Image: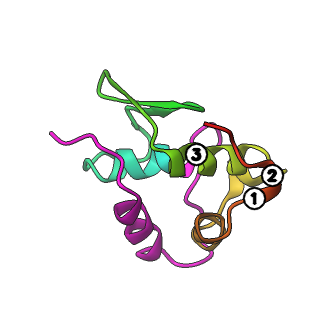
């Protein structure tokens, strides 16, 4: 099973949602939800975990790509985003990352 996190696939997933649909859950960022759903898993049982620099899917740990590190940082550092982010907000973050707090690699 391919567990790579690909930006264009994440964008396509976000675009498949209604703009105001919540794509993050409390304690699960949109990348957690994307990884879980893209593997046919339901939202209540998401065996994916995304940290600030790594992600784990079914026990396999990988480094986050640079775009995902920035996305996680931006979601985590915007008040209220981590538990109520919509598909449109997530797409906006991907298009216009928070330049003033860009993560250094």
Q: Is residue 27 above or below residue 90?
A: above
Numbered badge on residue 98: 1
Q: Is residue 17 above or below residue 59?
A: below
Q: Quadrant of residue 16?
A: bottom left
Q: Is residue 59 left or right of residue 76?
A: left
- The quarter of the image holding the C terminus is top right
Q: Nearer the viewer, residue 33 or 64?
A: 64
Q: Is residue 61 left or right of residue 67?
A: left
Q: Which residues are magenta?
A: 1-30
In this rendering, position of residue 84 left or right of residue 47: right
The residue labelled by disc 2 is 78
Q: Looking at the image, is mark 3 or mark 2 nearer the viewer?
A: 2
Look at the numbered discs 1 and 2 and tell me whether their residues touch, using CB distance below 8 Å.
yes
Tag 3 and tag 2, C-beta contact below 8 Å? no
Which badge, 1 or 2, comes first in the chain's sequence?
2
Whole-percent x and y of residue 59?
31, 21
Q: Which residue is mark 3?
A: 29
Whole-number angstrom distance, CA of label 1 to CA of label 2: 9 Å
Task: Based on the picture, tell me whether residue 80 belongs to the magenta stretch.
Answer: no
Q: Earlier in the sequence, mark 3 or mark 2?
A: 3
Residue 71: percent from left, percent from top: 61, 51
């Amino acid at each position: 099973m391919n567990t790579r996190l690909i930006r264009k696939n994440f964008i396509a997933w976000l675009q498949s949602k209604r703009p105001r649909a919540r794509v993050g859950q409390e304690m699960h960022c949109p990348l957690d939800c994307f990884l879980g759903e893209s593997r046919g898993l339901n939202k209540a049982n998401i065996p994916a975990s995304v940290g600030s620099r790594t992600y784990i899917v079914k026990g396999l740990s990988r480094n986050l790509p640079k775009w995902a590190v920035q996305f996680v940082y931006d979601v985590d550092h915007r008040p209220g985003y981590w538990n109520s982010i919509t598909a449109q907000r997530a797409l906006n973050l991907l298009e216009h990352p928070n330049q003033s707090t860009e993560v250094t690699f």
